[in-house]
Amino acid sequence: MMTKPVVAATDGSEESLRAVEWAAREATLHGAPLRIVSAAEVLSGMMEHKDDAQVDTVADVLRHNRDHALATAVTRAAAVAPDLLIDTGQLSGPIAQAVTASGSGASMLVVGSRGAGAFAAMILGSVSRYVATHASCPAVVVRDQTPAPHRKVFVGVRDVDSCDDALAFAFEEAAVREAELTAIYAWHAPHFSLPSHGGNQDTAESAARQLTALLSSWRDKYPAVQVSQHVVHGHPGRVLSGVSAQADLVVLGRRAPHGSGEHGAGTVTHALLSHAHGPIVTVPSSGVPAADATS
């Protein structure tokens, strides 16, 4: 059972409130408390004091909106999880950095995919992307949700030498959900390079062998989890976005970049955040500072 809190960020938009509801259900599933945070970015040029006590400053309005968003989110979370322990946090400063920092010490940090309105959607969409690529804990971006669980978790395996944290998260989520787990290795030559001396067939067979060996110890650790694996020749972002329509979660590891290849980890993450049909989780690799995470 998790003892660390699940943290969810809200800006008052419907998308963020749905993310809060998802986080409330997740906290209940894991027996963890829920912390809801919201940020008011008060810039240095904004008036902090007013001459006329009857006139609100821009800073006042921003703080009022933040506090209203928190109150609304608590109501929504309590409605889906009446017995859940919930507290709130008022954040200030640059929104993306403040929300990301709020995940320190959390079991996961949950955000919506965008905010309310065209301009806000652009800004807050960038916040969710920043969180997904910089948070020190697993970061969940909640996109479309289905009313009934699929009981399927997918994990993308990009590098067999640095995916233990993503696999640990994926297996634990599959176990607590009593869900099937499918590990997917997708490559699009020449950017995903396992030993390949006979073209795509050799690459697929080599990847399948490595994936089987990689999953063996995890199968032993989680014997109740039904596990399958797939090796697919295709753009990893498109492959994982496609399976997301039938998944409760799609999990992807996150590490410091090694070059800027077209199909690098950052490209896959951004493709998922733009096109997935369900919650996406990016899991940082141990020892990778948040500031160095793939962006």
Image (cartoon, helix red, strand yellow):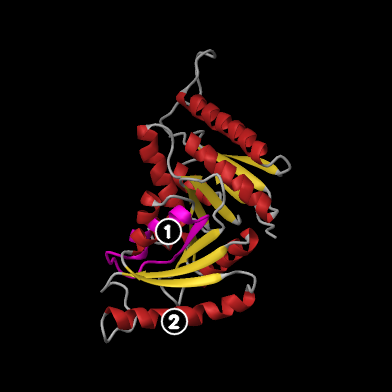
On residue 210, which mark appears? 2
- The residue lying toward the viewer, choosing from 193 and 247, is 247
206 relative to 53 in the view: left or right: left
Amino acid type at mark 2: Gln
The quarter of the displayed image where residue 66 is located: top right
The residue at which mark 1 appears reads as: 243
- The residue lying toward the viewer, choosing from 228 and 121, is 228
Place of residue 117 in the rendered image (x, y in percent of width and height, measured from the top left): 39, 31
Asked if one can make out residue 274 in the rendered structure from this viewpoint, the answer is yes
Place of residue 273 in the rendered image (x, y in percent of width and height, measured from the top left): 40, 51
Q: Residues in magenta?
A: 242-268
The quarter of the displayed image where residue 225 is located: bottom right
| Helix, strand or loop under label 2 | helix
Of marks 2 and 1, the one in the foreground: 1
198 relative to 240 in the view: left or right: left
- CA gap between label 2 and label 1 equals 22 Å
